[in-house]
Amino acid sequence: MYLEISNVAAAIGKNPYESREKLLLISWARHAPSNVVEYLLDNECIAPLEANEEYSNLHNEVYKNNLPETFDVKDFTNIEEKIVQDFKKIKTERNEEYTEKDIKQLKEFTQDSLKKDNGNNQETNIINKEKYTKGNTKMFYYTIAPNAKIGGRYDASNGSNGSNASNKEDDMILEIKTRTRIHNVRRNEYDLVQLICYLLATGKKKGKIVQIFNQMKFDADEASEKEFGIINIEDEEYKNLAEEIVNKLKLYFEELDELIKTSKYNYLNMVIPKKIRPIGKFENYEKYDDNTYLLENLCEESPKFNNLFRFL
């Protein structure tokens, strides 16, 4: 079994924006997609398109056509307005109707995509500006149990890279976090958990969380109200946190293992309430005798379940 390091905080109940219960469903889909598709179908969480509906990738097309080469958080509102206006224009030209629900879904998709794209842009900019060593070139893993591990690629370091990485005292793993609001520049426990896991996976002793807002950098070495400063995994506080993370991950993987074996998922109404179902629609579904399947053009009703759908 496998879990991305970026999802560890959710797995151990330390991410307020992604529940452990939802992540269990996503992990189950990673390891047993055919079973999860059947489960979602049986519970009306995904459904075929209606006779008067058709698959459309218009949200993505309009977004890409209106995305500037360079932008920052201050540009989000203007970009969103242009995307909505272009969407309405195209629909009108095609003599197609659109609803308030269509516009709401488009805005949710746009906001989610802008945050991701801006984060990637800011990460690249700060790595180049500060001459950090880019880290997203190699996977690192840490074994939690004989049948379970976590893994991922860290953002950057201030030292050498790869298997020949230096063990210099000042060589640190850097996790870069882009904030969309100034009051979000703060000490987030889920960011700290992610950094600790990268230290475990790479064998490095030190790391730091670098926060970026509107091209301003927050990367103090000393701890403050808004920053953790330099994290040394050999310090008692962080050594204890690392032990807590590993112990809670063992419990998570034990529950996931049981879920994969039994397909008994007890959190569906909490994760996907009946009032929001279906969360996705598809053009065609076929299941074959060898337990493989074909699921064509699954389109989500909300970007909140992107991580689930990518495994289906």
Image: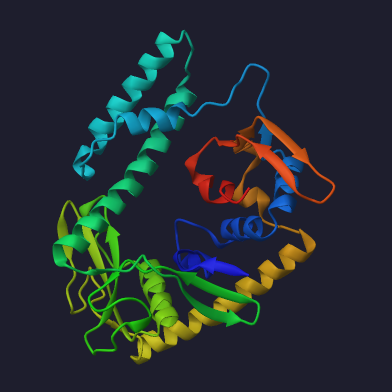
Q: Residue at x 58, y 68 (%)?
A: 2
Using residue 236 as the reference point, say whether residue 171 is left or right of it: left
Q: Quadrant of the N terminus?
A: bottom right
Using residue 55 as the reference point, say whether residue 228 is left or right of it: left
Judge by depth and name the residue closer to the eye, 16 or 83: 83
User: What's the colour scheme?
Assistant: rainbow
Residue located farthest toward the front when viewing the structure as drawn? 164
Splitting the image into 4 quarters, where does residue 87 fall?
Answer: top left
Question: Total label count?
Answer: 0
In the picture shown, does residue 169 fall above or below 5? Answer: below
- Give the image location of residue 197, x and y in percent: 43, 76
In the picture shown, does residue 277 fall above or below 121? Answer: above
Judge by depth and name the residue closer to the eye, 200 or 284: 284
Q: Residue at x 71, y 46 (%)?
A: 37
- Give the image location of residue 276, x and y in percent: 59, 37
Using residue 105 as the reference point, say whether residue 221 is left or right of it: left
Q: Residue at x 45, y 60 (%)?
A: 16
Judge by depth and name the residue closer to the eye, 219 or 266: 219
Q: Residue at x 32, y 42 (%)?
A: 114
- Give the image location of residue 304, x and y in percent: 50, 45
